[in-house]
Image (cartoon, grey):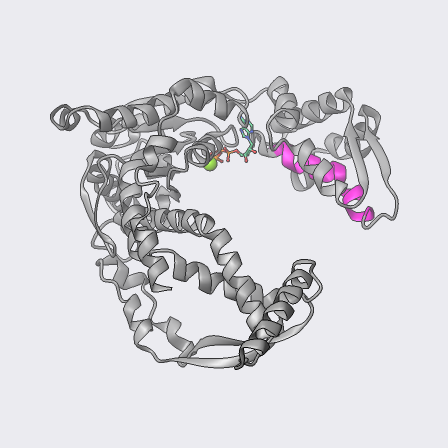
Amino acid sequence: MAREIVEIQKSPEIENPKLDLDSLTPKQIVAELDKYIVGQNEAKKAVAIALRNRNRRQRVTEEIAKEIQPKNILMIGPTGVGKTEISRRLANLTSCPFLKVEATKFTEVGYVGRDVDSMVRDLVEASITLVHQEEVKRVEQEAERKVEERVLDALLPGLSTTPEERENTQSTREKLRQKLRDGRFEEEYIEVKVQESAAPQMNVFSNEGLDQIGIDLSFVSNLIPQRTVTKRIKVEDARDIFFKEEAEKLVNHEEIRRRGTQRAEEMGLIFLDEIDKLAAGGREERSGPGVSRQGVQRDLLPLLEGTTVRTRHGNVSTENILFIAAGAFTMAKPSDLIPELQGRLPIRVELQPLGQADFKRILTEPADALTKQYKALLGVENFELDFTESAIEEIARIAYKLNESVENIGARRLQTVMEKLMEDHLFEKADLSKIESFTVDADYVVKKLSAIVQDLDLSQYIL
Ligand SMILES: Nc1ncnc2c1ncn2[C@@H]1O[C@H](COP(=O)(O)OP(=O)(O)OP(=O)(O)O)[C@@H](O)[C@H]1O
Ligand SMILES: [Mg+2]
């Protein structure tokens, strides 16, 4: 075991993940985003450029890099048009550590509540989790092999002493292995030793508050004696327990922490939603929440500019972290933010309201388009679903109309409309013994939805 850990430390790591992951060209980034997001080309281009600029900045000489200010982005646009979605997809496709926070969640430093620095700490945690997942994935096969041995050990207890016996057991073991691989022991019970903490109420020592001052108390939980208990559980359940244990033994936690922190620093992406709610809304407020909201804006300045935040994994510089702030700005204008904050969000992009034609595309084109989702969902029940072109047209028309007459909630309207449209099928079609097919056409859409659409009162509640 020890030998293997050493080997892993020495093995050439994917030491510099940014080379593989952060090296997409702006065009490639936009092409990837196009797979999921309809329209909003200006916003896509802006985030693609910002991401690439960060990568460029990391490659110029240190002297020049110091002079180049990070360019954070302010996204402006009505609700449900893709602000969050663009950032989320961006993070996914580059495996940048990503954190989405509501700006309204924070309170000014010195007051009770979460201070803005905590978002950097959360980003670091997210990043470490990400690296940890990658590492577990990397050792997956080896861990699975060890799991199999442990299951076999448990199925075949007792040590054999004489050489013949050992040989016998060896061949029995191989036979068992084959059966195990054929899935014939999954329901079998085996005895498993599991670690149980002697102090289950340990959670009262939450790290939350202490984390704020950058102290790691997680070692306390290691001081509480662990008790090993033997349990009888099914093979299929034992696999999960064994896998966790084996994978944890194979990965290098110190290394994961180090790389997680480093990746947060170099490739982190923080999405600051509802930034408009921090704006004063035109009025100068002298007391009450307004003052605190301005305080939060002020607290954000150093973060956006580049500062060092103390986390329990060490100091983290925010210099290369890309901030994308977003807001609908219906009540307040971007110019209602304090000037220094406006200055630190130099790239402004406006997202466009979505039209009926966009809705049609959103329903069908993205890799995760709603019609595809419902097809897949009902497909598992042996129910083959299809949509005619005119049905899509009609759904888009109804959604658009509802946005105009009730309230404009952007593409989110499609979700409520689709759910209502598919309601009967979702309820009735379950475990079909033979395949059934159904094609949603325009008639069906009208029949199912027109009564609700016409009744404005009803649509306010249902769609
Ligand atoms: N341009 C688009 N292309 C494809 N899908 C979209 C688009 N805009 C929105 N959607 C869909 O609508 C949902 C809501 O969009 P999103 O979360 O991006 O809204 P938002 O602009 O952040 O709104 P809010 O201001 O309310 O946070 C997304 O999950 C996505 O499925
Ligand atoms: Mg959003």
User: Percent from the top left, x then y, of residue 315?
Assistant: 19, 49
Q: Is residue 457 visible?
A: no
Residue 414 counted in the magenta span:
yes
Residue 12 counted in the magenta span:
no
Is 268 on the left-hand or right-hand side of 88? left
Residue lying at the far left of the rendered structure: 63
Q: Which residues are magenta?
A: 413-429
Q: Quadrant of residue 262?
A: top left
Q: Quadrant of the N terminus?
A: bottom left
The structure residue drawn at horizontal position 58% and vertical position 30%, both measured from the top left corner, is 411
Q: Out of 1 and 306, give the one closest to the viewer.
A: 1
Is 431 on the left-hand or right-hand side of 173? right
The structure residue drawn at horizontal position 14% and vertical position 23%, both measured from the top left corner, is 64
Q: Is residue 33 visible?
A: yes
Q: Which SS does the magenta portion mostly show?
A: helix
Q: Is residue 421 above or below residue 104?
A: above
Residue lying at the far front of the rendered structure: 164
User: Percent from the top left, x then y, of residue 151?
Assistant: 57, 68
Is 9 on the left-hand or right-hand side of 429? left
Q: Quadrant of the C terminus?
A: top right
How many numbered markers are drawn?
Answer: 0
User: Percent from the top left, x then y, of residue 250?
Assistant: 40, 58
The structure residue drawn at horizontal position 40% and vertical position 47%, both measured from the top left corner, is 130
Is 82 on the left-hand or right-hand side of 248? right
User: Percent from the top left, x then y, of residue 97?
Assistant: 37, 41
